[in-house]
Image (spheres, rainbow, N blue to C red):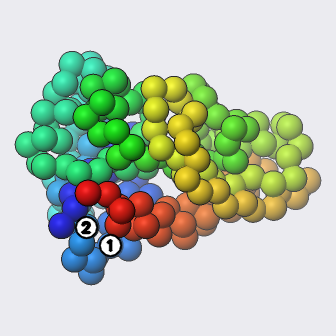
Amino acid sequence: MKRIVLLASGYGSNVENIICYFANNRNLEFPLILSNKKDAYVHKRAMLLNIPSYTINKSGFENGQALRLLKEFKIDFIVLAGFLLRVPENLLRAYPNKIINIHPSLLPKFGGRGMYGLNVHKAVVENKETESGITIHYVNENYDEGKIIFQAKCEVSPTDSSEDIAAKVHALEYEHFPKIIEQITRDIP
């Protein structure tokens, strides 16, 4: 049984989608959810899903508090699902090639610091892009620069608002993210 932690900073809809997707999976379990924000709605989702959730602020990630908690829970793999902090070096060293993220654009376009949520979709509209999508990638020391694992695209019409694009991208996230997690974790020791 592989143990996965989900990290989120906000609403947690991807977290809930992932947990529900794996509800009957006997190979993976999700013993906890971490957030860097105590008021993030993901904590409410965790409570409804009967999964413990913890808040660890930025300094707690940097000083090893988060790593100690992951070791205590015997975590094998880390999934970022709307997590807005840069992953610190101590976690990258402890979990080499075992941390993945989903980004709401076709990287390398519209990635990096500050490019999350509607900011990304507004940039897509402003740049008159004809497509957008998702990128699932390994996490390294830089925002959205890790090796790309998977991308899925959606069309963007000239009349699409950033909210329209967000809806299309969310649909791709819900469809593909759990499947990619399942594929990747199948191969880890």
Quadrant of the frame with the C terminus = bottom left
- Judging by the rendered image, the residue that carries numbered circle 2 is 28
Which of marks 2 and 1 precedes in the sequence? 1
Residue 147 place in picture, x, y as percent: 55, 42
Against 87, is 43 above or below?
A: below
Picture quarter containing residue 17? bottom left
- The amino acid sitting under disc 2 is Leu
Residue 166 in sight in this render: yes
Secondary element at tag 2:
strand
Q: Which mark is residue 22?
A: 1
Picture quarter containing residue 30? bottom left
Given residues 60 and 93, the one toward you in this image is: 93
Cα distance, mark 1 to mark 2?
7 Å
Picture quarter containing residue 188? bottom left
Residue 35 in sight in this render: no
Q: In the rendered view, does 25 fall on the left or right side of 170?
A: left
Q: In the rendered view, does 14 fall on the left or right side of 36?
A: right
